[in-house]
Image (spheres, coloured by chain):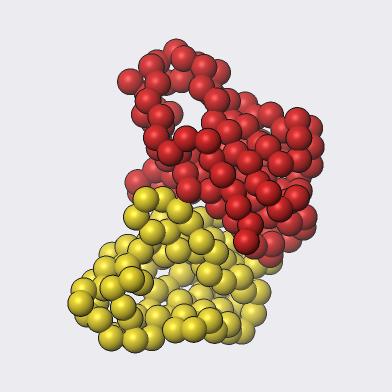
Chain colours: A yellow, B red
Amino acid sequence: KNEVEQSPQNLTAQEGEFITINCSYSVGISALHWLQQHPGGGIVSLFMLSSGKKKHGRLIATINIQEKHSSLHITASHPRDSAVYICAVAVETSGSRLTFGEGTQLTVNP
Amino acid sequence: DVKVTQSSRYLVKRTGEKVFLECVQDMDHENMFWYRQDPGLGLRLIYFSYDVKMKEKGDIPEGYSVSREKKERFSLILESASTNQTSMYLCASSLPGYRGNEKLFFGSGTQLSVL
């Protein structure tokens, strides 16, 4: 079992829908990252969380440390949101090293 | 904006060749990382470096080595390329820190094919 599990693996939505991507982890962490990867490979950091909730534009990330779970929400989704969304955790005993989930492929249709 | 530049976007090499993948960042970051990304496996850490001339093995260092002679440049070396090293290689950098809460900046990736 991977230390970081994302669900769903694939998600197709219609433009305007509210989207949720989930990340569960099985180890103690010092931080959790959400990343976005567009076709072509480039990866962009969206959020870093160690508690609570963060919001940036239409993106919201939450984390529940007790339940070892994080969610990434996209409100009013748009075709340009189509990408792979990756969850990564900094394991408490591993310093700056991150452990990555396999990613969620999101496709938003117009 | 931070820029992390990888020298090649696509690379095709033959089995047994020595391969150099170069990564340069322009924001004076101490931390630099090399990952490979394969379908179904996510990103896996090959090597990382916290400072010049310093390197540490990641989760899958076998068959790879690295060099960090200058702060801005972190090179990944495949001593004798093999077909199972065909992959997307991603370089990243971050400010110093040891708790994993430093923002990562990624290069565009190098898709390496070993024939």
Q: Nearer the viewer, residue A88 or B17?
A: B17
Residue at horizontal 35 percent and vertical 46 percent from the top: B39
Classify residue A48 as left or right of residue A86. Answer: right
Task: Report the number of discs.
Answer: 0
Q: Is residue B36 visible?
A: no
Residue B56 found in image quarter: top right
User: Does residue B19 sit above or below B88 in this rendering?
Assistant: above
User: Does residue B17 sit above or below A92 in this rendering?
Assistant: above
User: Does residue A85 sit above or below A14 in this rendering?
Assistant: above
Residue A84 found in image quarter: bottom left
Residue at horizontal 63 percent and vertical 57 percent from the top: B2
Q: Quadrant of the N terminus of chain A?
A: bottom left
Q: Is residue A81 visible?
A: yes
Residue at horizontal 71 percent and vertical 41 percent from the top: B72
Residue at horizontal 38 percent and vertical 17 percent from the top: B14
Q: Position of residue A90 (x, y in %)?
A: 63, 60
Q: Nearer the viewer, residue B97 or A43?
A: A43
Q: Quadrant of the C terminus of chain A?
A: bottom left
Q: Position of residue A76 (x, y in %)?
A: 34, 86
Q: Position of residue B62 (x, y in %)?
A: 56, 27
Classify residue A71 as left or right of residue A107. Answer: right
Classify residue A54 as left or right of residue B109. Answer: right
Classify residue B58 as left or right of residue A79. Answer: right
- Quick one: which residue is furthest to the top in this view? B16
User: Does residue A39 sit above or below A81 in this rendering?
Assistant: above
Q: Position of residue A108 (x, y in %)?
A: 26, 73
